Amino acid sequence: MNRYNGPPFEGFDMPVNGTGITHFIKATSNVGFKAMLSDPEIAESLINELFKSIHLAPIRIADEGRLEVPLQGHGSFTGVDYHAITTKREHIIIEMQMIRHDNFDKRVLFYAASTFANQEFEGGEWAPQIKDVYTIQFVDYFTQDSNPVKYYEMVNKLSLKVGQDGQLLPYERISGIYWIQVELKGESIRDIKFPVQGELTELEWWWYVIKYSNQFDSDEIECCKLEGELKGLLDGFIDFQKIPPTAAKRIKETEKLLPRSFVEEVGNHYINEGKISQEQLEHFIELLRENGILAID
């Protein structure tokens, strides 16, 4: 078990057919997708999980807001589903596409290239001022590529140098526009059914939540929240060997104490990863009991 930290759908729950069962809005819809990314911590977590999978450096979001891309010759603008600027002034563009569109790839490249080209320039040494643009697409259909998580450097070839023999020298790489595409249908990352069985990686949890968001119920969401809280406590315990009083108070106030069996399940995953020992896990459980946040199974 290895869930992401916290549900992205709080506040959008709806009773189903008068049954009293709560389900949550679909993340692949326009409203659901924008609502999910409205929390900067959630957006940052998703972006960095994708970046980690393709060995890109993590980012921190400095600002979120509408990005208007000019449509040359039309005198109008188009918007993107999500746009953020990082602390390094890089641009992040995310699009959710539910239906296959023949020109979707070209549209994505146009958004990214236009954003790259229309950066503000205030003089001086221009090169450090030109920041990278990252574009991420979630597509809710089958692509033709056999590898559904893809990474491209769209601006990656340029050569104006001529060798002594009169031939152009090998291309020099120019990084600037990056493209990540995640397919949600079929065996994207790997085929995971709902409800999930077994362990998932952090990236697989994101794929699972986005794909099956409208099938989640209150218990599933509470379980995600509880595990996020527990993992935060475990990480803090590894660093400081204690349970923060503020965290203990927060858990008590929610009246959702941590079951010992649940703590052992998550803790055993930490043991398997070599993060803690069995003795440390037992000490952690004892600290939870002393702080009054360990439930009696």
Image: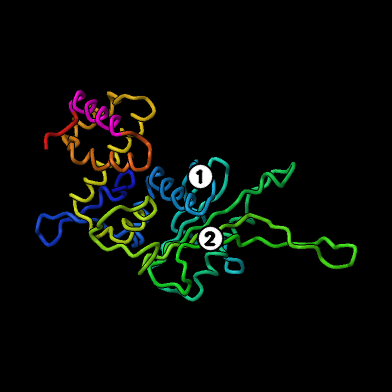
Residue furthest toward the front?
Answer: 278
Considering depth in this image, is 47 or 269 the residue closer to the camera? Answer: 269
Q: What element carries label 2?
A: strand
Quarter-wise, where is residue 95 in the image? Answer: bottom left
Verify whether residue 79 appears in magenta.
no
Rendering coords of residue 13 (x, y %): 22, 53
Give the magenta-colored segment's residue range.
Answer: 278-292
Label 1 – label 2 distance at C-alpha: 15 Å
Residue 34 x/y as whole percent: 37, 54
Q: Which residue is drawn at 57% across and 59% down?
A: 112
Q: Is mark 1 on a helix, strand or loop?
A: loop
Here the colouring is: rainbow
Classify residue 123 as left or right of residue 164. Answer: left
Task: Read off the residue under disc 2.
Answer: 151
Q: Mark 1 points at which residue?
A: 58
> On the rendered structure, is 211 left or right of 165?
left
